[in-house]
């Protein structure tokens, strides 16, 4: 899915850039070539494959809408969509407030905050697979952290019960990506003019009041950007969930991307897998568009002046 | 990226547990060499799996062949198990596969056959009857598609057996169960001591499947699954299936399996560790786990505390208690896309190098039973004589040596099967729902 994800985010940006200044349009050619080669062309291939039946080894046979019918009438699709939505919504709900708080905290110029910023950044340096393997070992009910430290509270069947496993997935995703979003917020907070806070202080506003009346409104576009990355990114969670739970127990954590992989590469049903890939792209596009609308359209309008 | 699929195969490779080394080796080997490579017109290519000790044995066999045949050498490329499964499929689909394709036979082989990608070896085996007659006849079942042989059986036989920790059973004060009734009676007694009756790496899914395979065979005999395999409509609706599913869920509900089994993977060997450390009393698993337990299991194996037996009968069942399930062998096929000279080299490799006396000795030395008849005396003088004689006995005396379901079926049906088995053990579907779901994918 990683090859399909970038177009979702980049498509509108590329369009806007091309339209604005014709003279430097040629500068976008390398990016366009990469985008065409690794984004658009495979996408067309997947769309074509979704109207065929292919086991990945033999010949490709045209199959009309058969794959679409199979997938759309399969209750598994609705379930996967629901799980994907849950992961998306919950990980957004966990990550956004925490990222804002950490971001605002790290925006301070004190030395110890700089040090903490570096420490907070570490999870982002690790690969998803490594993180998943580590957490899987830590959460093992018989040999993990809980069993090792004799803490019954920690010795739950973390990855063996549906709701718990979903919670673990969201926790690990958040643990991995909060540093990244904190970094975005940190940068955004540092751009807020100091004068605003000074004015607020003169008016007698406390710290809480300035946070809710100045910092948060000023972060509006950053929240939109960070949320877009979170929401669209959560559609492509694969490696982490695959290693951590393999979609289990049962199908409790089987998100769309995992469903696609299982159908395509484990069940050798490339047609239906391509259908899911197309659905994934559509869902991603719609979500990205929606979020841009929510953000109030053109990001070109300045949020600093006249605020 | 780890791909946890139909992965008894993972286990073949991990069998003597040098996983780290194997992984490194996999990273270090050169990339796949496409179709060509080697020197001379008859140079053939051969892809196989990493993982000691099997990897070393495979390499040695190729080296011996190359020393004897300077003009038609075989170049090999090694892959880590999980990567191999996807790689070989893609490569064969793209016409870039090797001359000699290492595989597991059964449903996977059938999909190659249907795509016309592998050579029919029936007539070659007819002409070279000596090659065929020295191997276990049971090994040819999974190499045969529609009455024709498409692969050379190789390497070792690996039935699934019931392992038990003698120390733990003594502590509980019970004998190894001799029937399904004994198993259900033993479960509460073992649980009462704070020990799990059975270890199970349930996230791997095929591990759960082994229980169903044995239960169905013991209850209804091999004909029940055969009907499914042949694609008979509603074949899963036979009464024995309902019995098998109900008994399985009864065992789950009675806490027969280790707590958290559905998040344990067999690939990490955590299921074996549970048996070794005495946290679980028994474990149904392939004989390939013996080597790992011997190497890493303290004195469990070396001190004689590891017991093993065939799966016990079920009261009133129709199946023969000598039947077994597992890997009847590993399989080497020849690509139909290879040149005639390459095919000749491959056939020469099959008849002169595969399972020659040196390779047979290596398999036995590493705790395996090669699929060659008449090795009893060699097995008897090995360090693991008792276990090897047991494996040889189970394999050669079995009235039916069934191939594991997920390997016998097409990949499509196997995935649906494993998915539903996981849900069955999770108690998230009823036996009737399981039957309905599985009837839908019969014949796919």
Image: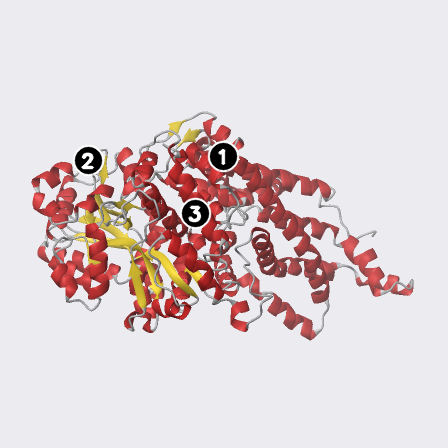
Which residue occupies the foreground of this view, A11 or A90? A90
What residue is pinned by disc 2?
B148
Q: How far is mark 3 from mark 2, CA to CA?
A: 37 Å
Between B155 and B258, the one lying in front of the other is B258
First in residue order: circle 3 vs circle 2:
2
Residue B330 percent location from the top left of the image: 24, 50
Q: Residue at x 19, y 62 (%)?
A: B364
Where does residue A159 sit, x and y in percent of width and height? Answer: 53, 56
Q: Quadrant of the N terminus of chain B?
A: bottom left
**Chain of the residue that carries numbered disc 3 in the rendered image:** B
Query: Residue B189, how many percent across, how many down?
Result: 45, 63
Up/down of A86 relative to A203, above or below: above
Q: Specify the quadrant of the image occupied by residue B360.
A: bottom left
Mark 3 to mark 1 CA distance (whole Å): 38 Å
Check chain identity for marks 3 and 1: say if they share one.
no
Q: Which residue is mark 3?
A: B247
- Residue at x 51% of width, y 37% of height: A276
Q: Which mark is residue A275?
A: 1
Outermost residue toward the right in this view: A203
Image quarter (top left, top right, bottom left or bottom right) of the C terminus of chain B: top left
């Amino acid at each position: 899915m990683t090859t399909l994800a970038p177009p979702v985010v980049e498509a509108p940006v590329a369009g806007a850039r091309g339209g604005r200044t014709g003279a430097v349009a040629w500068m976008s050619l390398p990016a366009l070539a990469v985008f065409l080669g690794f984004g658009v062309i495979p996408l067309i291939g997947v769309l074509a494959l979704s109207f065929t039946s292919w086991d990945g080894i033999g010949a490709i046979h045209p199959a009309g809408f058969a794959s679409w019918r199979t997938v759309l009438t399969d209750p598994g699709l609705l379930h996967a969509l629901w799980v994907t939505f849950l992961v998306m919504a919950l990980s957004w709900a966990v990550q956004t407030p925490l990222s804002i708080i950490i971001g605002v905290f790290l925006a301070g110029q004190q030395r110890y905050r700089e040090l903490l910023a570096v420490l907070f950044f570490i999870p982002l340096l690790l690969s998803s697979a490594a993180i998943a393997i580590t957490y899987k070992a830590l959460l093992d009910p018989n040999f993990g952290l809980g069993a090792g430290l004799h803490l019954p509270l920690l010795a739950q069947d973390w990855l063996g019960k549906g709701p718990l496993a979903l919670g673990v997935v969201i926790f690990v995703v958040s643990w991995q990506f909060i540093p990244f979003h904190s970094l975005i917020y940190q940068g955004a907070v540092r751009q807020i003019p100091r004068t605003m806070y000074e004015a607020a202080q003169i008016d007698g506003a406390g710290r809480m009041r300035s946070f809710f009346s100045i910092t948060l409104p000023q972060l509006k576009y950053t929240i939109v950007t960070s949320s877009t990355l979170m929401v669209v990114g959560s559609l492509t969670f694969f490696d982490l969930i695959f290693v951590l739970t393999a979609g289990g127990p049962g199908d409790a954590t089987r998100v769309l991307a995992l469903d696609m992989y299982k159908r395509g590469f484990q069940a050798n049903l490339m047609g239906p897998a391509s259908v899911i890939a197309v659905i994934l792209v559509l869902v991603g596009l719609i979500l990205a568009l929606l979020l841009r609308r929510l953000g109030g359209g053109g990001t070109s309008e300045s949020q600093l002046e006249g605020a | 990226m780890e791909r946890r699929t139909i992965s008894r195969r993972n286990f073949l490779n991990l069998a003597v547990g040098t996983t780290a080394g194997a992984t490194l080796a996999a990273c270090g080997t050169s990339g796949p060499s496409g179709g060509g490579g080697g020197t001379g017109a008859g140079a053939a290519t051969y892809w196989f799996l990493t993982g000691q000790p099997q990897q070393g044995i495979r390499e040695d066999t190729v080296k011996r062949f190359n020393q004897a045949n300077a003009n038609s050498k075989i170049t090999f490329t090694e892959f880590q198990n999980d990567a191999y499964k996807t790689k070989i499929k893609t490569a064969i689909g793209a016409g870039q596969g090797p001359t000699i394709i290492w595989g597991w036979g059964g449903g996977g082989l059938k999909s190659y056959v249907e795509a016309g990608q592998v050579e029919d070896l029936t007539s070659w085996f007819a002409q070279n009857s000596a090659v065929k007659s020295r191997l276990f006849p049971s090994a040819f079942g999974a190499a045969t598609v529609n009455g024709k042989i498409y692969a050379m059986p190789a390497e070792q036989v690996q039935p699934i057996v019931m392992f038990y920790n003698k120390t733990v059973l003594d502590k509980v004060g019970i004998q190894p169960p001799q029937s399904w009734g004994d198993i259900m009676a033993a479960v509460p007694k073992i649980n009462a001591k704070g020990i799990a009756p059975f270890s199970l790496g349930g996230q791997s899914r095929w591990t759960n499947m082994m229980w169903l395979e044995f239960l169905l065979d013991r209850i209804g005999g091999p004909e029940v699954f055969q009907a499914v395999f042949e694609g008979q409509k509603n074949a899963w609706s036979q009464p024995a299936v309902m019995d098998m599913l109900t008994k399985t869920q009864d065992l789950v509900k009675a806490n027969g399996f280790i707590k958290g089994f559905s998040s344990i993977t067999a690939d990490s060997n955590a299921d074996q560790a549970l048996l070794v450390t005495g946290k679980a009393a028994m474990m149904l698993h392939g004989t390939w786990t013996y080597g790992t337990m011997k190497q890493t299991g303290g004195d469990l194996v070396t001190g004689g505390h590891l017991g093993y037996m065939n799966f016990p009968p079920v009261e009133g069942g129709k199946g023969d208690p000598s039947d077994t399930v597992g890997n009847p062998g590993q399989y080497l096929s020849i690509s139909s896309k290879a040149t005639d000279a390459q095919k000749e080299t491959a056939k020469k490799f099959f008849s002169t190098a595969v399972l020659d006396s040196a390779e047979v000795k290596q398999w036995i030395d590493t705790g395996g039973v090669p699929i060659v008849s008449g090795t009893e005396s060699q097995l008897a003088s090995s360090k693991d004589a008792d276990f090897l004689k047991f494996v040889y006995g189970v394999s050669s005396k079995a009235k039916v040596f069934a191939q594991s379901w997920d390997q016998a079926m097409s990949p499509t049906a196997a995935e649906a099967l494993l998915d539903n088995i996981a849900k069955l053990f999770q108690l998230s579907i009823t036996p009737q729902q399981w039957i309905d779901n599985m009837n839908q994918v019969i014949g796919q």
